[in-house]
Image (cartoon, rainbow, N blue to C red):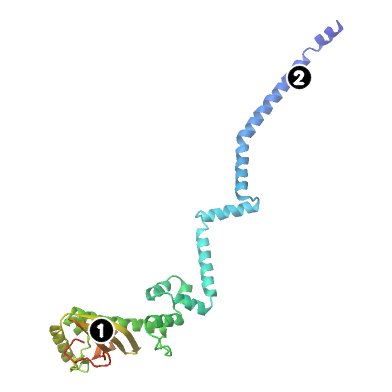
């Protein structure tokens, strides 16, 4: 009876404890669910970044900045300029001998294109030693001791122009074009032409008349030019060469000399001399021939 009366007197207390415990449990479950929904994804993202970079703190910001540059962000232009500066400094650090040797592998068009890339390449490509090496490779070593007044680059360009117009002379012969031959020669009374036959012609009209006869008389020819040597001076240049002229079933071996003068920025032929070369120790029979 005493026990029964004790519980009956305080019977509402266990229900209060149960109610409070239930409220606390529900709150904890709700808080835990909220934390998992909104906190854990951020934590996973942070862990993913840390695992990828293996860095944290200020290093993470450095990685982020680097990624932004590599992905073409605002630092892309800065990075490209930095790489260009590095390349230029490496070129500038090469000793002149190595630079000249490297550029000697380039041909004339490539060296000109290189000079238009940037200031460092322009200085390297305009180096006088580079053009001197290119001149000796493309033309001749005979003029190693000369010092061109305007540098080897200008001397190379002038020599290239003479070699090209000398080649044009042989193209005209192959095409048998008298108008083109007339434009090639300087219209002056002192021009001279000596053909391989020994015939001598002087003056513009006389020279053109000799080529007209040669084009009308000779059959089609096949000319191969070898051992071309040129020398260019202010206002005048000459070219020596060996020519192998195939006419019908006979080949004539000739030595030729062409002389050019510069007038109003254009080169004109003023002298041509052609003669037979000895064949097997003997002079070939002189015949009227093109040359």
Name the image quarter holding the C terminus: bottom left
Residue 179 at x, y percent in the picture: 17, 81
Q: Is residue 21 left or right of residue 246?
A: right
Per the image, label 1 sits on a secondary structure element best described as strand
Which mark sits nearer the N-terminus, 1 or 2?
2
Judging depth in this view, the residue of 98 and 121 nearest the camera is: 98
- Whether 94 is drawn above or below 243: the answer is above
Q: Nearer the viewer, residue 118 or 14?
A: 118
- Please state the horizontal and vertical placement of residue 172, each as a whole percent of the image: 21, 80
Residue occupying the point 42% across, 88% down: 144
**How busy is the neighbourhood of tag 1: few (under 14 within 10 Å), some, or many (20 plus)?**
some
Residue drawn at 29 percent across, 86 percent down = 242
Q: From the viewer's perspective, is 133 left or right of 254?
A: right
Would you name the residue on which mark 1 appears? 244
The residue at the point 43 percent across, 83 percent down is: 132
Q: Which residue is mark 2?
A: 17
Q: Is residue 175 left or right of residue 122?
A: left
Q: Nearer the viewer, residue 187 or 196?
A: 196
Q: In this rendering, is residue 222 above or below 282?
A: above
Q: Position of residue 60 (x, y in %)?
A: 62, 51
Residue lying at the far right in this picture: please name it: 2
């Amino acid at each position: 009876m005493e026990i029964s009366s004790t519980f009956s007197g305080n019977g509402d207390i266990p229900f209060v404890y149960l109610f409070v415990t239930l409220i606390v449990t529900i709150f904890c479950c709700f808080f835990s669910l909220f934390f998992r929904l909104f906190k854990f994804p951020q934590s996973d993202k942070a862990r993913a970044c840390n695992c990828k970079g293996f860095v944290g703190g200020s290093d993470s910001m450095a990685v982020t900045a680097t990624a932004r540059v590599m992905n073409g962000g605002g630092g892309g232009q800065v990075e490209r300029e930095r790489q260009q500066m590095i390349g230029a400094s490496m070129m500038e650090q090469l000793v002149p001998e190595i630079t000249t040797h490297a550029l000697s592998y380039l041909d004339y068009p490539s060296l000109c294109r290189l000079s238009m890339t940037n200031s460092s390449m322009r200085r390297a490509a305009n180096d006088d030693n580079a053009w001197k090496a290119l001149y000796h490779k493309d033309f001749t070593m005979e003029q190693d001791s000369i010092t061109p007044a305007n540098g080897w680059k200008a001397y190379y360009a002038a020599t290239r122009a003479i070699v090209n117009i000398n080649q044009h002379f042989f193209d005209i012969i192959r095409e048998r074009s008298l108008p083109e031959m007339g434009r090639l020669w300087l219209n002056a009374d002192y021009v001279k032409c000596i053909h391989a036959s020994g015939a001598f012609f002087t003056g513009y009209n006389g020279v053109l008349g000799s080529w007209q006869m040669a084009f009308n008389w000779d059959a089609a020819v096949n000319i191969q030019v070898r051992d071309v040597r040129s020398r260019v001076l202010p206002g005048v240049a000459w070219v020596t060469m060996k020519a192998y002229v195939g006419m019908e079933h006979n080949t004539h071996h000739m030595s030729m000399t062409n002389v050019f003068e510069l007038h109003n920025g254009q080169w004109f032929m003023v002298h041509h001399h052609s003669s037979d070369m000895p064949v097997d120790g003997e002079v070939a029979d002189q015949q009227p021939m093109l040359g």
